[in-house]
Image (spheres, coloured by chain):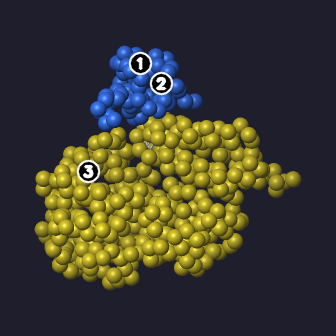
């Protein structure tokens, strides 16, 4: 059974117990929200602490600007996602489920609410809904918990981790919607679907969401989206928290949980776009998405974005290139959450893959008027 | 078993006053925006009293000393 191309139906939930966690472990399922954390480890951490008071947060925040797959899944298979949530609630002995859905993802939310209205009362009674603000960090686990508890979607210091003290102070599982759908298929059929949802973005003929077999190459995934629309210049694997790759390295890459593909965004940069300007724009976005709680993240990402922008708009210079290297190393690991780390990993990949472009970049305005 | 001490900074509380780096230049330097960068690794035994002082003197109480047991 695949995730997207099967009919979405209500059927009685299969009998599940703690044995499901072993089955999840054997399946090797890893979180599909971006971090790729082993699902069984997360479930076990909550199971060990739950006294019938655990909370399940169904994470459909999808704050990554290029990603669409969670929205598409909630729109097409809301019952499958709900199944995953109810199964989690049984296995982890939860008394509350929160659907945490991006506030701009209205079609997805409506689809989930319609499906919920079709479920039976004892199930429905467990569920409440919270709107995730359209911010990059809102999808982070600690931010989700913070929003549900206090109405503020900023990350908090960890520990305590959500599995220790999350929503209402209870052990909490925060799980991406696609991951929950995989669990639902596993519980129903005895096997995970063996597929993954990807969002193809940028220079492809048909940008959008595709479901591919695990192990498919990036080249085949791009072909599923109609192929490149223009000669590709680089590939951004994993979205804004991912990494740039050279086309020749990216195309043969096999898409597996171990491949580090984050939330499953594959962005193709066409030759008509400038990698330096593109990187600078994404860095400005990520700097603006700092929740401004931690100095190194707030000031550091802003300074990095400014240096990138100077190179992009005025041309390359040695001082800014050196600053980018030094600040990237210094900022890493110095936020309460992983936001700065994601941003500098992304930037470092740009500085490596497009090293020549960063070194020799000239202002496009100058070139045009020269 | 031996005891190790590690400095930790609460990145949300810290607002870059910089007092810690003045007291403990051996372990802490400041980045270009005035926020502390810690030297990696455990705190050397002989610096513990100074570290204690830095922990107590931080105006926003953003630094702490964590003890951990280490198996050898
Ligand atoms: S590291 Fe950045 S995004 Fe994360 S909590 Fe601190 S300021 Fe907010």
Cα–Cα gap, marks 3 and 2: 33 Å
Q: Chain of mark 2?
A: B
Task: Tell me whether the residue at label 2 lies in contact with that at label 1, contact meaning CB atoms closer than 8 angstroms.
Answer: yes
Q: Is residue A267 left or right of residue A109?
A: right
The answer to whether marks 3 and 1 sit on the same chain is no
Q: x, y (%) of residue B22?
A: 49, 17
Task: Tell me whether the residue at label 3 lies in contact with that at label 2, contact meaning CB atoms closer than 8 angstroms.
Answer: no
Q: x, y (%) of residue A59?
A: 33, 60
Instruction: Give the label, 3 or 2, closer to the camera.
Output: 2
Residue corresponding to mark 3 = A163
The verdict on label 2 being within 8 Å of ligand 1 is no
Cα–Cα gap, marks 3 and 1: 36 Å
Q: Residue at x 20, y 56 (%)?
A: A47
Residue corresponding to mark 2 = B27
Q: Residue at x 65, y 52 (%)?
A: A352
Residue corresponding to mark 1 = B47
Q: Is residue A292 visible?
A: no
């Amino acid at each position: 059974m695949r995730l997207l191309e099967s009919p979405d139906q209500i059927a009685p939930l299969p009998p599940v117990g703690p044995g499901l966690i072993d089955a999840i472990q054997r399946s090797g399922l890893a979180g599909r929200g971006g971090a790729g954390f082993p699902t069984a480890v997360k479930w076990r951490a909550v199971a060990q602490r739950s006294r019938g008071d655990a909370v399940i947060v169904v994470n459909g925040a999808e704050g990554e600007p290029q990603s669409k797959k969670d929205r598409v899944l909630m729109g097409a298979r809301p019952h499958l996602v709900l199944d995953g949530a109810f199964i989690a609630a049984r296995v982890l002995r939860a008394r509350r489920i929160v659907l945490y859905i991006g506030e701009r993802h209205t079609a997805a939310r409506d689809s989930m609410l319609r499906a919920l209205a079709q479920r039976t009362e004892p199930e429905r009674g467990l569920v409440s809904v919270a709107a995730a603000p359209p911010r990059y960090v809102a999808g982070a686990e600690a931010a989700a918990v913070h929003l549900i508890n206090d109405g503020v979607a900023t990350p908090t210091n960890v520990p305590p981790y959500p599995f220790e003290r999350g929503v209402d102070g209870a052990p909490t599982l925060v799980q991406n919607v696609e991951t929950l759908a995989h669990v639902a298929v596993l519980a129903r059929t005895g096997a995970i679907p063996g597929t993954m949802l990807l969002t193809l973005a940028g220079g492809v003929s048909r940008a959008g969401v595709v479901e591919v077999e695990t192990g498919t190459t990036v080249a085949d995934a791009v072909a599923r989206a109609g192929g490149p629309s223009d000669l590709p210049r680089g590939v951004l694997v994993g979205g804004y928290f991912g990494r740039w790759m050279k086309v020749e390295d990216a195309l043969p890459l096999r898409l597996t949980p171990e491949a580090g593909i984050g939330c499953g965004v594959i962005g193709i940069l066409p030759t008509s776009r400038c990698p330096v300007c593109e990187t600078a724009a994404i860095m400005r976005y990520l700097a603006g998405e700092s929740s401004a709680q931690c100095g190194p993240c707030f000031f550091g990402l802003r300074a990095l974005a400014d240096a990138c922008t100077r190179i992009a708009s005025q041309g390359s210079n040695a001082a800014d290139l050196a600053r980018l290297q030094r600040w990237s190393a210094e900022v890493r690991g110095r936020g309460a959450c992983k936001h700065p780390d994601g941003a500098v990993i992304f930037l470092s990949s740009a500085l490596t893959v497009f090293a020549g472009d960063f070194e020799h970049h000239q202002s496009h305005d100058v070139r045009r008027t020269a | 078993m031996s005891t190790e001490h590690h400095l930790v900074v609460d990145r949300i509380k810290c607002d870059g006053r910089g007092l810690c780096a003045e007291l403990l230049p051996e372990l802490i330097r400041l980045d270009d925006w005035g926020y502390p960068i810690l030297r990696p690794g455990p705190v050397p035994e002989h610096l513990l009293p100074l570290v204690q002082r830095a922990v107590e003197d931080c105006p926003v109480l953003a630094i702490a000393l964590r003890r951990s047991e280490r198996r050898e």
